[in-house]
Image (tube, grey):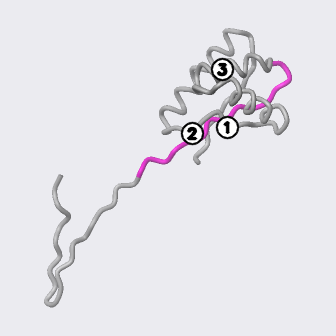
Amino acid sequence: MTDPPIRRDEQTVTREGRRTKRPRRHKVLLHNDDYTTMEFVVSVLVRHFSKSVAEATHVMLQVHHRGVGVAGVYPKDVAESKVAAVTEEAMEEGHPLKLSTEPE
């Protein structure tokens, strides 16, 4: 890695630094519906989001009572991959489970 450019003035020498920004993280959201079973939501959270059964149950209850719950927070590409994988599995199982991402 190279050093930032040095700017010389008659009285001072300053280094213009560049800060690297961390990529913005995205929340994976689960949305409530009237058809997807609570058991399926818990199993998705355990298998795809590495939640314990207790954590998964807590998130599932948030989805059930509040209409939405956060499954996890990831870099954008990982979040989008998880949404695609879970949506595909839900469709295969006959569940209309809706997932989305939003910046943190």
* Quarter occupied by residue 62: top right
Q: Where's residue 72, x and y in %?
A: 60, 35
Which residue is the site of mark 3? 44
At 69% from the left edge and 27% from the top edge, which residue is drawn? Answer: 56
- Give percent across and percent down for residue 8: 14, 80
| CA distance for labels 3 and 1 | 13 Å
Left-right relation of 42 to 33: left
Q: How many residues crowd around disc 2 within 10 Å: few (fewer than 14), some, or many (20 or more)? A: some
Check if mark 2's residue and mark 1's residue have beta carbons within 8 Å: yes
Q: Amino acid at mark 2?
A: Val
Which class describes the residues within 10 Å of circle 3: few (<14), some (14-19), or many (20+)? Answer: some
Residue under the point 56% across and 42% down = 26
Image height of 15 relative to 61, above or below:
below
Q: Residue at x 20, y 64 (%)?
A: 4
Check disc 2 and report the residue beneath it.
73
Please, what secondary structure does the residue beneath circle 1 have?
A: strand
Query: Looking at numbered disc 3 in the image, what kind of residue is underneath it?
Result: Val
Residue 55 forms part of the magenta stretch: no
Region of the chain picked out in magenta, as a range: 22-35
Side of 46 where 75 appears, left or right: left
Q: Whole-Å distance between the Cαs marked 2 and 1?
A: 8 Å
Do labels 2 and 3 touch, CB within 8 Å? no
Left or right of residue 102: residue 37: right
Which badge, 3 or 1, is on the more N-terminal residue?
3
Q: Which residue is mark 1?
A: 70
Q: Is residue 103 above or below residue 47?
A: below
Q: Is residue 29 magenta?
A: yes
Q: Earlier in the sequence, mark 2 or mark 3?
A: 3
| Tag shown at residue 100 | none
Mark 1: amino acid: Val
User: Residue 66: x percent and y percent?
Assistant: 82, 39
